[in-house]
């Protein structure tokens, strides 16, 4: 789960929810009695249990293109400025065959381990046996980037410069897409990944008409939607605002869709753009320290040459303070504000 400090810019703090390692202990196996360790200490088939008093804490971190990250000021856990390593991705399986992944984060102080944390990528509950089935020491950065990326789901209709509506999965590099600020723009890269629709990876469904969208819209949780308020009912002090999909969830007309797998697509242009999906304005992918690992190596390595001005139009100034979003009926308020 991310926090409002996640503004998609290099140098901006990104907030994630983590358990302390000692809240997840081995109840059966070689490491019995021990809390979750770092990669070199983990042993497959160990059975873990989450403590009944386990609490998710907010950890603020400063992403970097390469490891390590650093813990940011204001974090509930860890020492600000300390190095934070994306140690490994772990895969657990419950007795009923449910798969849950997590990212092991290791804080260090002068090369010594100062803290170990688990960033769950799915739901984890106390008194459930979690068998450690997989340990991936190389996938941490890519997994974190997938979580930070704004993505459309398969079937989402994107507006081309011609006015035609095309499913995102049918788009090809070189097509001209309609953008709000710069008219017709060329699609430079489109990414695709399939992931389990659970936890922070579960997409957000915005029902048809909730934001004047032509059809149901299903996007990644941190995908920012652009809204022009004809009347500032939000109290943001400006007409143009960007709202993350997860802030709109009300459990009725806007909801998380968990279970199974989801196909996510990312769209990259010369600049970070606002495009049209199901008839409403939504952002395209922004490449920064959080998301760069999603790109193929040849694209990421030549990004400054291929897209030298990409990070210029981040639209971060339009993102709304979280305090203004903590209210019931937010989606309906914004629909009325944009229609009045």
Image: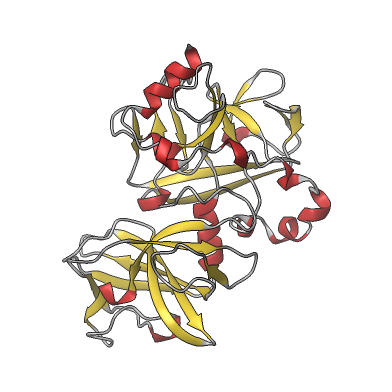
- Asked where in the image residue 141 lies, by quadrant, the reply is bottom right
Left or right: residue 260 versus residue 179 is left
Q: Name, please, the residue furthest toward the right.
A: 305
Colour option used: secondary structure
Q: How many marks?
A: 0
Q: Position of residue 339 (x, y in %)?
A: 48, 13
Between 88 and 335, the residue placed more toward the observer is: 335
State the residue at coordinates (31%, 61%).
Answer: 56
User: Is residue 285 at least partly visible in the picture?
Assistant: yes
Q: Position of residue 235 (x, y in %)?
A: 46, 28
Between 58 and 168, the residue placed more toward the observer is: 58
User: Is residue 204 at least partly visible in the picture?
Assistant: no
Q: Position of residue 163 (x, y in %)?
A: 67, 17
Q: Position of residue 139 (x, y in %)?
A: 52, 67
Between 9 and 156, the residue placed more toward the observer is: 9
Q: Is residue 330 above or below residue 292?
A: above
State the residue at coordinates (55%, 62%).
Answer: 142
Left or right: residue 125 versus residue 225 is left
Q: Name, please, the residue furthest toward the top.
A: 340
Q: Is residue 166 above or below residue 116?
A: above
């Amino acid at each position: 789960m991310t926090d409002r400090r996640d503004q998609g810019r290099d140098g901006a703090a990104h907030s994630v929810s983590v358990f302390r390692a000692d809240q997840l202990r081995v109840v059966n196996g070689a490491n019995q009695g021990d809390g979750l360790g770092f990669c070199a200490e983990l042993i497959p088939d160990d059975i873990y249990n989450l403590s009944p008093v386990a609490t998710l804490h907010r950890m603020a971190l400063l992403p970097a293109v390469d490891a390590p990250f650093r813990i940011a000021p204001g974090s509930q856990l860890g020492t600000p400025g300390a190095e934070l390593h994306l140690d490994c991705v772990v895969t657990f399986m419950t007795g009923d065959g449910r798969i849950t992944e997590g990212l092991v984060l290791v804080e260090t102080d002068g090369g010594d381990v100062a803290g170990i944390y688990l960033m769950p990528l799915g739901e984890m509950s106390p008194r459930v046996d979690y068998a450690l089935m997989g340990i991936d020491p190389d996938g941490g950065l890519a997994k974190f980037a997938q979580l930070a990326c704004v993505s459309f789901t398969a079937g989402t209709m994107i507006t081309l410069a011609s006015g035609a509506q095309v499913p995102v999965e049918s788009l090809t590099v070189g097509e001209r897409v309609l953008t709000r600020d710069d008219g017709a723009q060329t699609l430079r890269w489109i990414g695709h990944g399939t992931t389990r629709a659970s936890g922070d990876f579960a997409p957000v469904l915005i029902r048809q008409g909730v934001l004047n969208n032509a059809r149901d819209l299903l996007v990644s949780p941190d995908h920012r939607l652009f809204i022009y308020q004809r009347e500032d009912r939000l109290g943001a002090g400006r007409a143009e605002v960007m709202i993350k999909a997860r802030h709109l969830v009300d459990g009725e007309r806007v909801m998380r869709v968990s279970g199974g797998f989801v196909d996510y697509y990312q769209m990259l242009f010369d600049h970070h753009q606002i495009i049209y999906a199901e008839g409403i304005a939504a952002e395209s992918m922004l490449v920064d320290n959080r998301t760069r690992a999603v790109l193929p190596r040849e694209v990421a390595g030549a990004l400054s040459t291929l897209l030298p001005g990409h990070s210029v139009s981040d639209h971060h100034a339009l993102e709304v303070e979280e305090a203004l979003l903590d209210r019931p009926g937010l989606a309906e308020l914004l629909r009325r504000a944009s229609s009045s």
